[in-house]
Amino acid sequence: MPELPTKLRGDLERTIIKARDVAEAGARVALEALTVHEGKPGTHLNAAGRALRLRLRAHARQLGDKRNKRTDAQRIDHLVHECAYEHWHRMLFARFLAENDQLVEPSSGVSVTLEEVEELARDEKADPWELASRYAEGMLPQIFRPDDPVLAVALPTETRVELESLLEGLPRETFRADDSLGWVYQFWQSKKKDEVNAAGEKITGDTLPAVTQLFTEHYMVLFLLHNTIGAWHAGKVLAEQPEIAETAETEQELRDAVALSSAYSYKFEYLRFVREPLDGDPSDAPTGPWRPAAGTFDGWPKTAAELTLPRHAREPVRNGLENLYRLFSQALELGSLIDPTELPSDLIAADYETLQPFLDGIFQHESADVEIRERAVAAQGMVKAADLLARDYTLVITNVPYLGRPYQSQTLLDFADENYSDAKQDLATILIDRFQASLPSGSSVAVVTRQNSLFQTGATGHARPKC
């Protein structure tokens, strides 16, 4: 699929910025109508409304919204943002799926177009976009939590109509470009990023995503993938067929030779090759066999299925969930810097497979109140995050966030001083150091980072983090 043209990118940015304003205004109206922010439920709420209000209040506290213990009133700023985000992006995913022939009607298992969804909605006397959104939600349970209370909130009719109009105003080509989805997430943060930067304050967990979430250009992603996984694949092909490396005349000839041949053929367009020098060759004009410029990653596993290694086994402990909470209590600011493997073995949480049945039991227990259920949801996320962060990986490939030391919060400053003193001048170098220090022998790191990180004062070592 093609990249998103500049004009369509500009149209998408304006639409996303407008959609966030509309969605957040509508979400606040809907949540206040449910009296989520007030100390007492509104007298107009029926039993279902009261139950939803309790779930939303519990969920808001898990997101970081504070409750006044004296009046029981509660802030809902985080909840408003999440409600707006989930509703808009569920609609957006529905259109992405539909325009790529992947939106499936659940009872038949057949992909449907937006026009066919309109017909189905007419039969069900439902809103077409709400129906399409429900289809998308069911197809992507890892993205949209099936029992998410914010998706049970009914946005005002005028909000839904305006969001639908914004979505329908985008041309089909926008949803068929390779990089559109990546731009969507950056544009959602555009206005907030400008506001945070204009304020000139220290960057906290609440503002960190807006400032550091930058879209990685399509060609950068492909360059990293092609010169890591592609180079590893090419090395195996050339080892089996050395005559290709000896007789090829151009890099393109080599790219064609190592392309993946399957029902959907794939070429490593950005994969670079160099020639080995032979005796007597000029230093700038070698004539020997070709090899991938990035190397062949001989320390990697031999098959693609083995590229991510299993996590180290651990002894489950009784206080696993409590330790998980302590570990992730600063996750908003530390994120992937959290390293569960750095804790002593007797303090680490039980593994995901061990804890998951207990969490599932909470959801199935009818007497569990909404507060306990929301805590279980949060714990489920922390257990999965710990499981992912504690694994050994063959390759880490990412665009690291950039945040200079003068703008870091005190939490991040203290953490960097204690654990990454050689790399503390920028969040980007801290993340790179974290990857290099924690990866097993033979693994590789491929990142998009600024050139000045190579020359930062003090960024010469690779400190092993303590936590």
Image (spheres, helix red, strand yellow):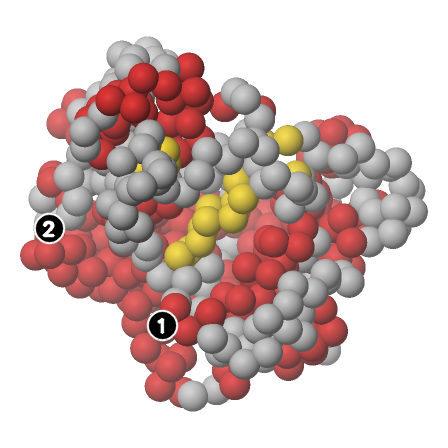
Q: How many labels does the image show?
A: 2
Question: Tag 1: Cα neighbours inside 10 Å, few (<14), some, or many (≥20)?
Answer: some
Q: From the viewer's side, name the closer residue of 363 and 237.
A: 237
**Residue located 31% across and 25% down the image:** 245
Q: Is residue 2 above or below residue 347?
A: above
Q: Is residue 401 left or right of residue 169?
A: right
Q: In this view, does 60 lie to the left or right of 272?
A: right
Q: Which amino acid does label 2 sit on?
A: Pro
Read off the residue under disc 2.
5
Q: In this view, does 196 lie above or below 230?
A: below
- Percent from the top left, x then y, of residue 268? 28, 32
Secondary structure under the numbered disc 2 in the rendered image: loop
Q: Quadrant of the N terminus?
A: top left
**Residue located 36% across and 72% down the image:** 192
Sequence-first disc among 1 and 2:
2
- Percent from the top left, x then y, of residue 326? 78, 59
Question: Tag 2: Cα neighbours inside 10 Å, few (<14), some, or many (≥20)?
Answer: few
Secondary structure under the numbered disc 1 in the rendered image: helix
Q: In which quarter of the image is the C terminus?
A: bottom right
- Percent from the top left, x then y, of residue 162? 19, 55
Whether residue 10 is visible to the viewer of this picture, yes or no, is yes
Q: Which amino acid does label 1 sit on?
A: Lys
Read off the residue under disc 1.
192
